[in-house]
Image (cartoon, rainbow, N blue to C red):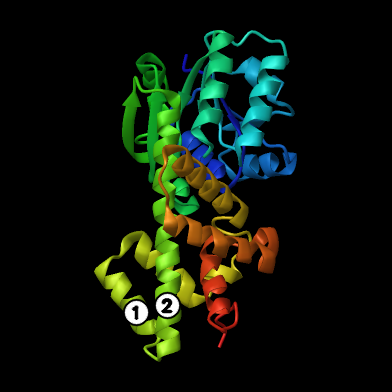
């Protein structure tokens, strides 16, 4: 019989990954799902194939029934609270495999990995790269770090199921996977910052954003083209909920800047992006989007936050 899976955390990324695990994960028992807001679990369960998921009412209930527990939650505090709850609930977790896909500080990953290992459990750090749409289509890039035997147990739920590619860091410390994840996310921050500044320059000089958007799409394509289109179309302020919430983007920027400071270097483009994200949060609140950096740069240049005109 295949291992019983329990998924904790149903943000945009988590919902997409659960969908693909249900559809392609070769499960012979319903996927157990839990979210702090229960209604989100119920809605996802109703959307997926009948009898393919089971909603549980607590973390302890799911952990007790499962062999493999996957977490994908918003931030370090949520991850640590979840692991504390798992350990304090008093059940035997020896031999169970825990995989964390959250984007958190490497030190946090090391702490939770050690805490679970001290209880006899196995742990894999499994952050993923990609937007919510990539999670929905199973096109993420997974990173797996930890003891090789544990990584091998985790593999069946990533490449070919939730992910199109895998970066194998088996044998490496858990935190190294998060070093890669945090560093990689700075490329997204920098990309949006560059696009925002370029489009504002295009508008202010009379070049116009249409031509610059065409250049970006044809020359660079991929995420550059997609984000450029989001800026020009106004998607950066129209989407609800946001594609990449401002608080999550600021969390990632903060981790990167913390790591850089500790290493004796600087990430200046991340520093600039964080200042603009701060303006996004002040102007829009928690519904602000990473792409709202464009609105912040527009305001600095004397334009409206929204490009409605």
Q: Residue at x 74, y 29 (%)?
A: 57
Q: Earlier in the sequence, mark 2 or mark 1?
A: 2
**Residue depicted at x 67% and y 39%:** 41
Nearer to us in this view, 8 or 203: 203
| Image quadrant assignment for residue 148 | top left
Asked if marks 2 and 1 touch (Cβ < 8 Å), the reply is yes
Q: Is residue 63 visible?
A: yes
Secondary structure of the residue carrying numbered label 1: helix
Q: Residue at x 46, y 77 (%)?
A: 232
- Image coordinates of residue 227 in percent, x first then y, are 43, 65
Residue 24 visible (yes or no): no
- Residue 212's label in the rendered image is 1
Residue named by callout 2: 199
Quarter occupied by residue 283: bottom right
Q: Quadrant of the C terminus?
A: bottom right
Percent position of residue 249, x then y: 55, 53
Question: Relative to the observer, which residue lies in front, 59 or 250?
Answer: 250
Give the CA distance from mark 2 to mark 1. 7 Å
């Amino acid at each position: 019989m295949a291992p019983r899976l329990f998924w904790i955390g149903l943000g945009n990324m988590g919902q997409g990954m659960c969908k693909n695990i249900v559809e392609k994960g070769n499960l012979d028992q319903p996927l157990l799902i839990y979210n702090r807001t229960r209604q989100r679990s119920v809605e996802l369960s109703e959307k997926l194939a009948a009898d393919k998921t089971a909603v549980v009412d607590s973390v302890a209930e799911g952990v007790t029934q499962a062999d493999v527990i996957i977490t994908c939650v918003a931030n370090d505090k949520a991850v640590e609270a979840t692991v504390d709850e798992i350990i304090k609930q008093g059940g035997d977790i020896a031999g169970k495999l825990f995989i964390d896909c959250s984007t958190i500080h490497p030190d946090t990953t090391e702490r939770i990995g050690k805490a679970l290992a001290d209880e006899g459990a196995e742990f894999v750090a499994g952050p993923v790269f990609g937007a919510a749409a990539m999670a929905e289509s199973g096109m993420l890039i997974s990173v797996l770090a930890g003891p090789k035997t544990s990584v091998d147990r985790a593999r069946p739920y990533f490449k070919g199921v939730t992910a199109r590619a895998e970066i194998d860091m088996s044998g490496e410390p858990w935190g190294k996977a998060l070093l890669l994840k945090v560093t990689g996310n700075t490329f997204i921050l920098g990309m949006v910052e560059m696009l925002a500044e370029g489009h504002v320059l295009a508008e202010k000089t009379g070049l116009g954003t249409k031509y610059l958007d065409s250049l970006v799409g044809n020359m660079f394509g991929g995420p550059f083209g997609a984000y450029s289109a989001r800026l020009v179309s106004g998607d950066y302020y129209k989407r609800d909920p946001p594609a990449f919430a401002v608080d999550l983007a600021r969390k990632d920027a903060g981790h990167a800047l913390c790591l850089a400071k500790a290493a004796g270097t600087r990430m200046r483009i991340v520093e600039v992006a964080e200042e603009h994200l701060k303006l996004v949060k002040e102007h829009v609140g928690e519904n602000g989007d990473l792409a709202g950096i464009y609105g912040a740069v527009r305001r600095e240049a004397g334009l409206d936050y929204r490009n409605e005109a």
